[in-house]
Amino acid sequence: MGQNTMTAAELDFRAEVRDWLRMALPPGWGPELRPAKTFAERMEEGKLWQRKVYEGGFGGLGVPVEYGGRPATATQKVIFAEECARARAPEPADIAGEFILAPTLLAMATEEQKQRFLPPIVRGEVTWCETFSEPDNGSDMANIQCRGVVEGDELVVNGRKRWNSMAQHSEWTMLLCRTGEPDSRSRGITFALVNLSTPGIRIEQMPMLTGDTRETEVFWDGARVPMDNVLGAVNEGWRAAMVTLTTQRAIGTAVLVPRASVMVEDLVELAARTRIGGRPAIEDPVIRDGIARCAIDVAALRRTGERAMAASALGRPVGPEVSIAKLHWSESEQRMQRLAVEMLGLRGLLTRDDEAAVDEGFWAHYWLWTHALTIHSGTSEIQRNIIAERVLGLPVKR
Ligand SMILES: Cc1cc2nc3c(=O)[nH]c(=O)nc-3n(C[C@H](O)[C@H](O)[C@H](O)COP(=O)(O)OP(=O)(O)OC[C@H]3O[C@@H](n4cnc5c(N)ncnc54)[C@H](O)[C@@H]3O)c2cc1C
């Protein structure tokens, strides 16, 4: 956020966050960090960090005080993310709960559900995941087939979900299941909040290019979910799902753009200590052009974020325009990491198991991970469809 566009309260908030971060960062975190740790270790650190954030008074920014949160503008939320990125603080483990579910609960849940589910998220006591996608239904979410049948005061769930990030590290999940007729599309879907320790739920690890234990498949075999955990009404989960997906795509602005800014600084630093043809890479015109392109990408993303925040300050809900940000940040991150790996040559491909790897394999690891960014939360093709149809108003292609 540009300093000159901020209010005095926002500037004070930035100073408060900076002061707190100076004393709160766990040992070993800071400017030199490279994530050579395993995914499970990073999740554990993320869980400890989110509790520290709450104890520091920054839990649940933007969540009303009656649910344990702290009032904050959208700009203050970005300031918090920017300062954490700048200080290279750990990533919170519960991105799904804090950034995706909490706004959905505030928009859609009953008072009783808000009282029950929001405070543990704010206090950083739980980790949530999302079980929407299925082996045959990713982009076409309205075609979900995992079955939910209402029996008394329970929803009985049978089916299979795939690509469920962090399910094995989470306690709860947001579930979409079909309660209507098989061909009822978006009119027959129910959104439920499910404790993953419920009998009848089995989680299996999926292999990933990076070696991270991040993705899972979740099998549902007669899992019984209390009807009190249904968000909105039975067969009316589509609206909540749309709030969730829109919020998910907006995360880029809140969390990832500040991190991308720091990544541009890292690229400059990497180029200064890497040699190409006997000279520092930073003197190579192709590398310089590449870094300039990344810096322009990030600047444009920040402006897009500021536009969204200005709209939110005027009370306008986040809409399909978040697809522009999602498309742009995911593709920019890929360009950045490709540039780093190209700059490093063959050594850039070595992973953390190899002694000769640069920065303990950080660049190779992150480059491999960025391939997922244009797929999860809706692929680039789907974002382009949304932009064409719902932002630009172009004819819908059938
Ligand atoms: C790392 C990672 C993490 C994920 N995390 C989660 C999670 O936590 N929870 C969850 O529920 N899901 C998650 N997903 C699943 C993700 O949302 C889906 O993979 C994604 O929506 C694409 O669905 P699909 O894999 O079924 O591909 P498909 O929908 O089969 O698409 C295949 C290809 O066809 C293209 N395509 C499909 N439809 C159209 C169209 N109408 N127009 C143009 N092109 C089209 C797609 O862009 C893609 O290139 C994750 C995926 C990944 C890779």
Image (cartoon, rainbow, N blue to C red):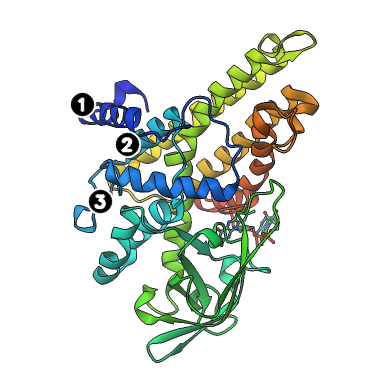
Instruction: Determine if residue 369 is in view.
Output: yes
User: Cβ of disc 1 within 8 Å of ligand 1?
Assistant: no
Q: Is residue 105 above or below residue 368?
A: below
Q: Residues within 10 Å of mark 1 (few under 14, many from 20)?
A: few
Which label number is shown at residue 75? 2
Disc 1 marks a residue whose amino acid type is Ala
Which residue lies at the image location 72% right of the left edge and 16% below the top edge?
286
* Residue where numbered disc 3 is placed: 69
378 on left or right of 2? right
The residue lying toward the viewer, choosing from 320 and 345, is 345
Q: Residues within 10 Å of mark 2 (few under 14, many from 20)?
A: many
* Residue where numbered disc 1 is placed: 8
Disc 2 marks a residue whose amino acid type is Thr
- Describe the element under mark 1 as helix, strand or loop: helix
Q: Alpha-carbon distance for marks 3 and 2?
A: 16 Å
Disc 3 marks a residue whose amino acid type is Gly
Which residue lies at the image location 46% right of the left edge and 61% below the top edge?
242
